Every structure is written in C-alpha cells, then in structure tokens.
Image (tube, grey):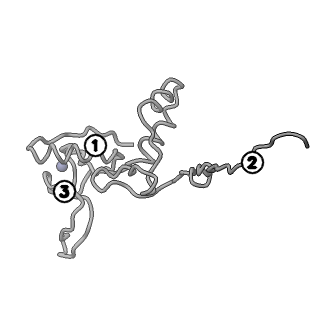
Amino acid sequence: MKSLIFIGPTFYQRLTHMSEDKVKFRNTGPVHPLTRQPVEDKKRFGGVKFGEMERDCLLGHGAAASLHERLFMLSDFSQMHICQVCERVANVIMRPDDSGKKIHGPYCLFCRSVERIVRINVPYGAKILYQELFSMGICLKFETETR
Ligand SMILES: [Zn+2]
C-alpha cells in the first residue's frame, strides 16, 4: 500500500447506562414513618413518583378508579373508627369489659359506648390532619352512612 497511514492510540469510554441499573419498580415497600406514604429515591427502594401531572392526565380520561387505586390504595391507605351517635372518632383501646376481662377494640370515649361504631377508609394524611386539629382543640365530626 503506497500511502501514509496514521496509526495512534484511540481511547474511548463505554457508556455506563445499563438497563439493569435503570429498572425501578415496586409494589409495596418502605413508607415514610410520619405520613405513611411511599418514600422517594431508588436507593431506598422508594416508589415511582405519581404527581399532579399524572393525576391530571388520568382525570382527563375519566379514570377515577385508577386514580383511587394509585393515590389511595397503593399509597397511604388507612382506616378509622367513627361513632355514628356522636359522629366523632372512636379510639381503639384496651379496656375492661363488664366481667372485668380486658378487651381490645374500638370504643367511643365521648359516649362511653361500643354501639354503632363503623370503620371507614381514609388516607393516612387525613388521619394526621384530624389528629393535629384535635391536638389544637378542634374536633371534626364525620357523617357516615350505614351500608
Ligand atoms: Zn360517640
């Protein structure tokens, strides 16, 4: 070959973006201790952020059941007991029954009764709001329907 050929070292770095490192999924996992909502960050096995834009997109398509599952059932699902007599929250406590035996269950401290107490599903964020308002002397009442 009658030509000048340049031969020299060539360096390159391969990209370190590996699909194995990109995979991020979870069904259930760690939750924040205060809000009980899924933690952020892949390193802590957190959830994929489902924010306002994703919510608005689903609202535009009329997908209420999907939103309910995404933002409530898979996030900070919680339950509260409500006394239907006084419409206040009934606490789950350990107390002695009529025979003196200790029993554990929902009990309305206002009515001093276990009658007509129902269990409702609420986001844990709503429960925290109720508790914080209660600590400031504001007691919310919950109207419930019997099904
Ligand atoms: Zn009550």
Mark closer to the chain start, 1 or 3: 3
The residue beneath circle 3 is: 113
Spatial separation of the CA atoms under disc 1 and disc 2: 70 Å
| Mark closer to the observer (1, 2) | 2
In the image, residue 59 sits, relative to residue 38, either above or below, namely above
Q: Residue at x 21, y 74 (%)?
A: 102
Mark closer to the chain start, 2 or 3: 2
Could you tell me which secondary element the residue under label 2 belongs to?
loop
- The part of the image, by quadrant, that contains residue 50 is top left
Q: Are marks 1 and 2 in contact (CB under 8 Å)?
A: no
Total marks shown come to 3
- What's the mark number on residue 7? 2
The residue beneath circle 1 is: 126
x and y, in percent, of residue 49 in the image: 44, 42
In the image, residue 103 sits, relative to residue 135, either above or below, namely below
Task: Locate the C terminus by quadrant.
Answer: top left
Spatial separation of the CA atoms under disc 2 and disc 3: 92 Å
Outermost residue, left side:
137
Outermost residue, top side:
60
